Amino acid sequence: MPTIAEKILDGKAGEIVEREVDYIMVNDVTGVPAFEVLDELVPEGGLKEEKVVVVQDHYVPNKDVASAEQAKALRNYARRYGIAHYYEIGKGGVCHQVMIEDGFAAPGRLIIGADSHTCSYGALGAFSTGVGSTEAAAAMATGRLWFKVPETQKFVIDGKRNRYVMGKDIILHIIGDISVSGSLYKSQEFYGGTIKDLNLADRITISNMAIEAGAKAGIIPPDDKVFEYLQGRVRGEYKAVYADTDSEYEEVFEYDAAEIVPTVAKPFTPDNTAPASELDVTIDQAYLGSCTNGRIEDLRVAAAILKGKKVNIEVRMVVVPASDKVFMQAIDEGLIRIFLDADAFVCGATCGACLGGYMGVLASGERCVSTTNRNFIGRMGHKDSEVYLANPAVVAASAITGRITDPTAL
């Protein structure tokens, strides 16, 4: 019987299918080359405008002339093609957060994005996956794209979570177990009481990092938490899709949540994991934000730890809400004041340092504990810098102590 991926793509694992997509997302890095290809494919300028979402997020506000020219080019394309779903700086945020909080992502939908972490929307029960700019252009022109239906792996996590264990720890634990190629060109499905207990933000973190194991998608069956979130938010109609009770999975993995602790991925791969309590690593920077962990729930966790305390004098802390709406909510809840009182630097929504762009780029020999999703060589700056991936609680605790710290030890 079919899995969620097979049902949404309407095909059997291994088949090549061509399907209508619901939305195509591009950002300031991938959008310009996509529109350049679109100009070649459809010289007269036609495209499926209602399906296209364009978000300025990676280099905003522009850091130099090159990024300013790139942003200008994307802005001009959006105007030329009359893109209604265009998000300018100050009116959106990180593309994946925008896609979710503005109601584009929904259960049962087929969404592509010219960004690898498009798989984030699987947390709402969608099949969403990253594509190249050329594929995005083809879909913008036709509204359709071909897919190879992936095999599906099932991940079952049951049991009560330990204190300060978040979605980030669950997915890092899984990646540490199966490796960064353990789900290569596969769809992941997540089940179990632990997953049901997670809030939507933690589920998004899990789906977001499915790609770090090589997966095409990371899907969590939608429930009332998803449906309630989408009320008054979702665009158009949607239909939730579930796997059959006797669906055939390529492999099934089972985990006991009680065995998962606050976890850190050491340089230079996300599967190089270890308990935070076992590390004794001094840091220069603590980074809280990104499409992985920049939501209001993440900021609340970090603020609760930082309240009444100061960032270590040897450390700089950077806080970046994932969207303008998250930023405003954090102001209303007093979270931004807590960060500022702790001597953290807070800025508006941007991908920034996550991709080594700016707003926290690392110098040679510097170490950063970060809520982002990748810790490759040179990912956040100099090739001789180091990035340690962790959840918001670990990042906040580490900012206080000046070394990677299990927050339960504070």
Image (spheres, rainbow, N blue to C red):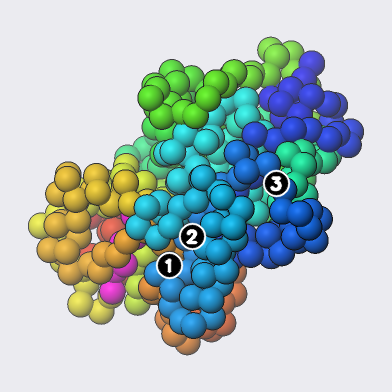
What amino acid does circle 3 point to? Leu
First in sequence: mark 2 vs mark 3: 3
Q: Which residue is mark 3?
A: 47
Tell me which residue sits at (14%, 57%) in the image.
337
Q: Is residue 34 visible?
A: yes
Residue drawn 28% across and 58% down? Answer: 396
Mark 1: amino acid: Val
Structural distance between the alpha carbons of marks 3 and 1? 26 Å
Q: Residue furthest bottom?
A: 364
Q: Which residue is mark 2?
A: 56
Which residue is nearer to you in this view: 320 or 133? Answer: 133
Q: Amino acid at mark 2?
A: Gln
- Are circles 2 and 1 on residues that touch, CB within 8 Å? yes
Tell me the quarter of the image containing the C terminus: bottom left
Where residue 74 sits, quadrant-wise, is bottom right
Task: Work out whether residue 9 or residue 157 is closer to the camera in this orientation and state it.
Answer: 9
Dominant secondary structure of the residues highlighted in magenta in the image: strand
Q: Which residues are magenta?
A: 316-322
Whether tag 3 and tag 1 are in contact, CB under 8 A, the answer is no
Q: How far apart, in angstroms, are the residues tagged by discs 2 and 3? A: 20 Å
Q: Is residue 257 above or below residue 304?
A: above
Q: Position of residue 240 (x, y in %)?
A: 59, 19
> Image quarter for residue 255?
top right
237 or 391, nearer to the observer: 237
Tag 2, which secondary structure?
loop
Please name the residue that numbered disc 1 is placed on: 60
The kind of secondary structure element at disc 3 is loop
Q: Nearer the viewer, mark 3 or mark 1?
A: 3
Element under label 1?
A: loop
Q: Residues within 10 Å of mark 1 (few under 14, many from 20)?
A: many
